Amino acid sequence: MKDLTKLRSVTLIYNRFKSFPQVLYDIVSLETVLLGNNQVNGVDPHRLMKLINLSTLDLSNNDLLNVPPELGLCSSLRCLSLEGNPFRAPRAAIVARGTDAVMEYLRGRIPT
């Protein structure tokens, strides 16, 4: 899959993925990853940061119990959808304020 150097968008909604598909971390051309309505329980923010073109990430309605603060360092993200997950932080009020508010919240939680 990493030979798919021109692949820009992946839509994998309404499946039964339990984790972020590992192969996607190697496709640096990706701009959009739609993984909503699955059973994804985590992502690797350090590997996501290598997707320098990733601007849209939909992880809504999954099984995320936490959102790693380092996800806030993915500077190319312009749209991050996290609604409908069972995590307690960030609170729903922050998620409702949109991507910028979530990213700011996450950056503020990165351990120093």
Image (cartoon, rainbow, N blue to C red):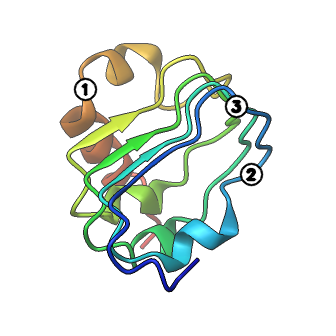
Question: Which label sits on residue 82?
Answer: none
Question: Which label sits on residue 98?
Answer: 1
Q: Closest to the observer: 110 or 11? A: 11
**Rendered residue at 67%/36% (across/down):** 64
Q: Closest to the observer: 47 or 110? A: 47
Q: Residues within 10 Å of mark 2 (few under 14, many from 20)?
A: some
Question: Which label sits on residue 38?
Answer: 3
Q: Position of residue 90 (x, y in %)?
A: 47, 31
Question: Which label sits on residue 19?
Answer: 2
**In this view, 54 is above or below 17:** below
Which structural element holds mark 2? Answer: loop
User: What is the C-alpha distance between the residues marked 3 and 1?
Assistant: 21 Å
Of badges 1 and 2, the one in the foreground is 2
Quarter location, residue 76: bottom left
**In this view, 84 is above or below 34:** above
Quadrant containing the C terminus in the rendered view = bottom left
Q: Position of residue 97 (x, y in %)?
A: 24, 19
Q: Position of residue 14 (x, y in %)?
A: 66, 26
Q: Considering only order in the chain, which callout, 2 or 1, is on the residue closer to the N terminus? A: 2
**Rendered residue at 47%/21% (across/down):** 91
**In this view, 71 is above or below 102:** below
Quadrant containing the N terminus in the rendered view = bottom right
**Rendered residue at 68%/69% (across/down):** 22
**Rendered residue at 42%/52% (across/down):** 109
Q: How many marks?
A: 3
Q: Amino acid at mark 2?
A: Ser
Q: Is residue 101 left or right of residue 35?
A: left
Q: Is residue 94 left or right of residue 15?
A: left
